Every structure is written in C-alpha cells, then in structure tokens.
Amino acid sequence: MSTLPPCPACASEFTYEDGSMYICPECAHEWPQDGSAEDSSDSRVIKDANGNVLQDGDSVTVIKDLKVKGSSLVVKVGTKVKNIRLVDGDHDIDCKIDGIGAMKLKSEFVKKI
C-alpha cells in the first residue's frame, strides 16, 4: 500500500514522487512535499475580459453573443448579470439571467460593471 497523500485537486490515490514534488498522473497537478499545497489553492484569482478582478456578488455585462447549449436562446451582448457567484471549473461564474434562468459563464466573456 502507498503512503503517499492523495491529490488535493482531484483526490486521486495514484500520486507519485518526483524529486521534492508529488505529482498526480490523472490531472497533472503538482505540489511540494512540504505540505504547502493549500496555500496555492487559496490564491486563485478570476479576472474578466479587461483584467479586472471578479468577486462574489459583483455585477457584470456580457461582451459577446452566447448561444445557450440545448436551446435556441441567445444571451445578447450587453446583458447585465447581477450577483454572480465564482466557482471552480471551466465555466467559473454561476448566475441567473432574466428570461433564461440559471447559467454558467466563462469569465473571458464578461466585463465588470
């Protein structure tokens, strides 16, 4: 049995050592063996298309027409979205858009108001 810690990013148990680092073969996450992996995960900063830092509760505007997958709806340029919530993942903004409902957006397609 392995005594190596699981990956902090994906919880995989197949981690291995490489020099002074642990490496996860499933998600390619690397972290130092001294245990400071938690410090690096808290420093994630999400920025909008103009480089402004986004925070939970901000209001943003959509800067590009976005097709809604699975329907014929389109989120138009200039649509204002209030009270966003930042989440992990490819689509890093959770929000509700009037007339459409709950959506996930990429931060590269919005600008902070």
Image (spheres, helix red, strand yellow):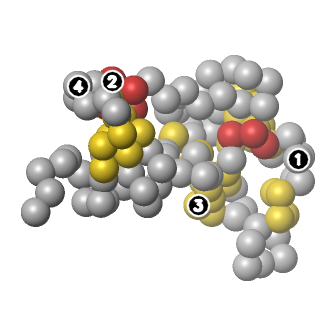
Q: Secondary structure at mark 4?
A: loop
Q: Secondary structure at mark 3?
A: strand
Nearer to us in this view, 77 or 11: 11
Q: How many callouts does the rendering have?
A: 4
- The residues tagged by marks 1 and 4 sit, at their Cα atoms, a distance apart of 44 Å
Between disc 1 and disc 3, the foreground one is 1
| Residue 83 picture location, percent across and down | 56, 38
Q: Residue at x 79, y 24 (%)?
A: 50
What residue is pinned by disc 1? Answer: 64
Quadrant of the drawing holding the C terminus: top right
- Quarter of the rendering containing residue 18: top left
Q: Amino acid at mark 4?
A: Asp
Q: Amino acid at mark 2?
A: Asp
Q: Amino acid at mark 1?
A: Lys
- The residues tagged by marks 2 and 1 sit, at their Cα atoms, a distance apart of 35 Å
Q: Amino acid at mark 3?
A: Ala
| Residue 22 picture location, percent across and down | 32, 40
Between disc 1 and disc 4, the foreground one is 4
- Quarter of the rendering containing residue 35: top left
What residue is pinned by disc 2? Answer: 39
| Mark 1 burial class by Cα count in 10 Å: few <14, some 14-19, many 20+ | some
Q: Which numbered circle lies on residue 102?
A: 3
Would you say 71 lies left or right of 43 here? right
Nearer to us in this view, 64 or 100: 64
| Residue 87 picture location, percent across and down | 49, 45
- The residues tagged by marks 3 and 2 sit, at their Cα atoms, a distance apart of 31 Å
- The residues tagged by marks 4 and 3 sit, at their Cα atoms, a distance apart of 41 Å
Between disc 4 and disc 3, the foreground one is 4
Q: Mark 2 or mark 3, which is nearer the start of the sequence?
A: 2
Q: Mark 4 or mark 1, which is nearer the start of the sequence?
A: 4
- The residues tagged by marks 1 and 3 sit, at their Cα atoms, a distance apart of 18 Å
Between disc 2 and disc 1, the foreground one is 2
